[in-house]
Amino acid sequence: MCGITGYIGKNKKAIDVVINGLESLEYRGYDSAGIAYVLDNKVNIVKEQGKIINLKSKLDFSIQSNLAIGHTRWATHGEPNQINSHPHSQGKFTIVHNGIIENYLELKQELLENGYKFKSSTDTEVACAYMDFLYNKNKNILLTLNEVSKIFRGSYAFGIICSDDLNNLYALRKTSPLIIANGNGENYIASDVPAILRYTNKYMLLDDMEIAKISNDKVEVYNKDLKVIKKDILEFEGSFESSMKGGYEHFMLKEIHEEPTVFKNTINAYFDGDFKNIPDLSKYNNIHIVACGSAYHTGLIGKYLIEKYANIPVYVEVASEYRYKHNFYDKNTLVILVSQSGETADTLASLRMVKEEGIDTLSIVNVVGSSIARESKYVIYTKAGCEIAVATTKAYLAQITIFALLTMYLTNNKSEEILNEINNIPSILEENVNIDYNYIANEIYQNQNIFFIGRGIDYAICMEGSLKLKEISYINSVAYQAGELKHGTISLIEKNTPVIAICTDESLLEKTISNIKEVKARGAKVIFITTSDIVGDFYDFKISVSKVNELLQPITTIVPLQLIAYNVAKLNGCDIDKPRNLAKSVTVE
Ligand code: F6R
């Protein structure tokens, strides 16, 4: 949900640094991009609709500026045109913003009454004008930012330049993520680590309501009482190279190919030592899993495994629903929040809601130090590394690996059988990620509707396969419980409608095959994905996946679905890493 970067320093060209940073944050939004840089004590703004490449064509990279802020946008207020692009400027302030100011209409009214005029329809221009409005009264930038943090409702990470103090870059944050990285005689701000990795892997996290005043040589962080505080320096484990495409055509493909390593890293982190920092989970009477999108789908797999093997009831809820409904939890409930980014607004809000009720929380998060990880009582980090493609693949795989491990932990299952299975998975995955599914993609990429059907845990996998396909290939697709189709949806099946049927739970093989025959009889083109060696005329194509222990089966079954989605999107000429209307980290509600 928008990426911001900023640079102040003596050593580099600020425009270069900010644009490089924005390019590695483009996965957060790509409706428009803009930059503000200081030259001869003047703030200049260049912004352009569309991707960063459009902005680059408007910039003079020979300019030697030592202070700049930049933005790549995922539009929330106002259409994604040039006027609504960031940076926005009002009076002495120029800002970039990630987040939403919920009370901006109220503030705008007050500003209009005080003579301010607006060019854009954004909340950000209002925020900028409000900073100028307060500053005109108190003539103190820190005081102004401290005051706005009490007045603005919603979420924000701001990069701020004030023309009265061009020796400093300012930043302020609430809910939306912001990091500050230190160099020698130079400093950076960014929404996420990839933006700074080519310069340094050391950074600090700005917490809610904290203000940073950043010069070439110094970073001062103030808390909400305007006292200077000391921040921990964190170190990012990955390298700049690892966050780049590494020869693959798309980040999504690279990230699918990283899955064998991600699996190994996740297992190595937790299998031997169990989960040292988490309590005995069997003491809880019930578990709620709360998440969004693909992370929610991993929760469905978690539910299936934990209920079947650990015999604990599990309720899986979409975070944007959970936080507004009546939930049944008590002191014996554990709420598990699943999130790759650790910043998803609804998941974070659900976490805060249950924490207030005194309920224990455990998060399964990929981004170290993210808000959800820091605010949960217990945290388990997935070891997926930096995920750049908007459509999650390797982080999803890491999350289902954690659910398999949690189930083993709950059932104290460290049998030789499971250990052998675990040891075999990386080579199975290695083989799977190298299979070419283009022949399947060719059969289905021109269809307007594609169905995924399965029962039990296979249905949970279908949901993820279907989401992956629709989000990157723009083909309408739905996942259905195989037995449910005949209660209405089967009317949509006609000649050549692709139906991807999954059956890895062989106890349900016969039932699932009956359902496949129902669609086949109505002309469906069936792609049957299974662990079984059954053959027959009820499918058009069969994809065999290796049979592994049920706890680990989803880990190998998901790979063909990810690759089919990738190949279909490619045949349709879609922008695979940056699908339309989407962004990686969803920090709006
Ligand atoms: C789909 C996808 C999204 C995310 C969802 C939650 O490929 O990536 O559905 O899973 O937006 O994001 P996180 O996991 O960051 O909370």
Image (cartoon, helix red, strand yellow):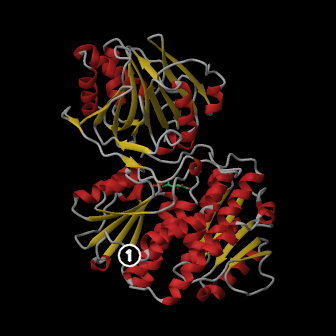
Say which residue appears at 62% left-offset and 19% top-offset.
60
Q: At 48% across and 72% down in the image, what residue appears?
A: 267
Q: Residues within 10 Å of mark 1 (few under 14, many from 20)?
A: some
Residue, disc 1: 274
Asked if the beta carbon under badge 1 is closer than 8 A to the nearest atom of ligand 1, the reply is no
**Is residue 154 something that shows in the picture?**
yes
Residue 588 in view (yes/no): no
Horizontal arrangement in the rendering, residue 496 relative to residue 208 (left or right): right
Establish if 164 lies above or below 509: above
Q: Position of residue 151 (x, y in %)?
A: 26, 31
Picture coordinates of residue 563, whole percent (x, y):
69, 62
SS type, badge 1:
loop
The amino acid type of the residue labelled 1 equals Asp
Q: Quadrant of residue 521?
A: bottom right
Nearer the observer, 377 or 485: 377
Left or right: 579 in relation to 15: right
In front of the other: 520 or 257: 257
Closest to the observer: 242 or 350?
A: 242
Q: Residue at x 39, y 32 (%)?
A: 158
Residue 156, given in percent of the width and then of the height, sits at 37, 37
Dividing the picture into quadrants, the one containing residue 330 is bottom left
Q: Is residue 19 above or below residue 584?
A: above
Count how many numbered circles sit on residues in the image. Answer: 1
On screen, residue 482 above or below 27: below
Q: Residue 565, position in %: x, y?
A: 68, 59
